[in-house]
């Protein structure tokens, strides 16, 4: 029964570890996932997204977003295991999908707000270089 309650934790933890592992790559996993949402199948939008990598604030933001997603999913997996250990199975069956959905929506909302602020941060960086 315990394994049945935590089986999703293996997938969640694996995704978190893949995110964190991709921090060692030239471009991180969330860069590619976000590009699919932003560009879809439009070659011009994909080229635009790829071109943003030249800006240090954008590439740093992609690394940070990937790190946050990786850590959030690892924490969610551990939390799910802890809940399965501490709570009755019926409670875990109810809480687990709500928690997974909440984490996903929270991360999507946070990523959107964070990435929309990147151009503003880049502008401040450029103004700082002009003044300094």
Image (tube, rainbow, N blue to C red):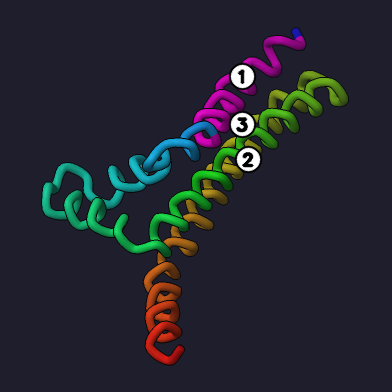
Q: Position of residue 71 (x, y in %)?
A: 63, 40
Q: Residues within 10 Å of mark 2 (few under 14, many from 20)?
A: some
Side of 55 where 60 appears, left or right: right
Q: Under tag 2, what secondary structure?
A: helix
The alpha-carbon separation of the residues under discs 2 and 1 comes to 14 Å
Q: Which residues are magenta?
A: 2-20
Residue at the disc numbered 3: 97
- Mark 3 vs mark 2: give the one in front: 2
Going from the N terminus, do you reach mark 3 or mark 2 first?
A: 2
Residue at the disc numbered 1: 10
Going from the N terminus, do you reach mark 1 or mark 3 first?
A: 1
Point out the image quarter for the N terminus. top right
Q: Say which of 102 and 115 sits in front.
A: 115
**Residue 14 vertical placement versus 49 (above, below):** above
Q: Under tag 1, what secondary structure?
A: helix
The alpha-carbon separation of the residues under discs 1 and 3 comes to 14 Å
């Amino acid at each position: 029964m315990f394994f049945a309650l935590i089986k999703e934790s293996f997938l969640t933890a694996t995704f978190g570890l893949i995110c964190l592992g991709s921090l060692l790559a030239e471009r991180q996993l969330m860069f590619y996932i976000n590009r699919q949402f932003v560009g879809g199948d439009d070659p011009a939008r994909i080229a635009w997204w790829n071109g943003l990598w030249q800006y240090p604030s954008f590439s740093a933001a992609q690394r940070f977003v990937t790190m946050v997603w990786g850590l959030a999913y690892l924490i969610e997996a551990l939390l799910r295991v802890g809940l399965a250990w501490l709570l009755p199975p019926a409670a875990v069956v109810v809480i687990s999908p709500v928690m997974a959905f909440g984490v996903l929506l929270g991360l999507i909302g946070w990523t959107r707000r964070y990435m929309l602020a990147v151009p503003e941060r880049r502008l401040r960086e450029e103004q700082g270089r002009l003044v300094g």
